[in-house]
Image (cartoon, grey):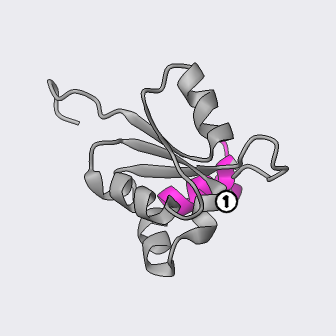
Amino acid sequence: MPTGEPAKPVAVIGERELVIGFRLIGVKDTFLTSEQNAVKEFQRVFDEGSFSLILASRKIQTLLPETLRHAVESSIDPLVVFLPTPGAGEEPESVATLAKRVLGVSLDTLVAP
């Protein structure tokens, strides 16, 4: 990012349980979705280009059409991280999986000096 440009904010999009937690810690750009409008709202936020990081519900990831899911998984601006809904018993994405998806780097193959 060139000097003098303001940093892009973080967006959170998903179910009430996920969004409220981030609102409570001060994230201003939160978008509450239902299953009926989740894909449309996610697409709007993703295409807007106003955010550097989008934290989205894992439920939204399962609803995305394959072409959009592929675009999201290969995107680094914005970076999209899918989070489990609190209390849903889902496993969060591991750092190793995130590094492989976003950077194309397998942490298993890296060797410390």
Q: Quadrant of the C terminus?
A: top right
- Residue 2 vs 78, above or below: the answer is above
Question: Is residue 110 left or right of 28 when viewed as pictured?
Answer: right
Q: Does the segment drawn in magenta span residue 100?
A: yes
Per the image, label 1 sits on a secondary structure element best described as helix
* Vertical placement of residue 46 versus 52, above or below: below
> Residue 88: x and y, percent?
81, 49
Amino acid tagged 1: Thr
Residue in the picture at 57% in, 53% down: 99
Report if residue 58 lies within the magenta region: no
Q: Is residue 109 left or right of residue 40?
A: right
Residue 60: x percent and y percent?
58, 60
Residue visible at 49% across and 57% down in the picture = 103
From the image, which quarter does the N terminus lie in? top left
Near mark 1 (Cα within 10 A), the count class, few <14, some 14-19 or many ≥20, is few
**Is residue 111 visible to us here?**
no
Percent position (x, y) of residue 24?
58, 21
Image coordinates of residue 18 in percent, x first then y, are 64, 39
Residue carrying label 1? 109
Asked where in the image residue 21 lies, by quadrant, the reply is top right
Q: Residue furthest right?
A: 89
Query: Toward which corner of the image does residue 72 lie, by quadrant?
Result: bottom left
For image coordinates 43% across by 42% down, the residue present is 53
Residues in magenta? 95-113
**Majority SS type along the magenta span:** helix
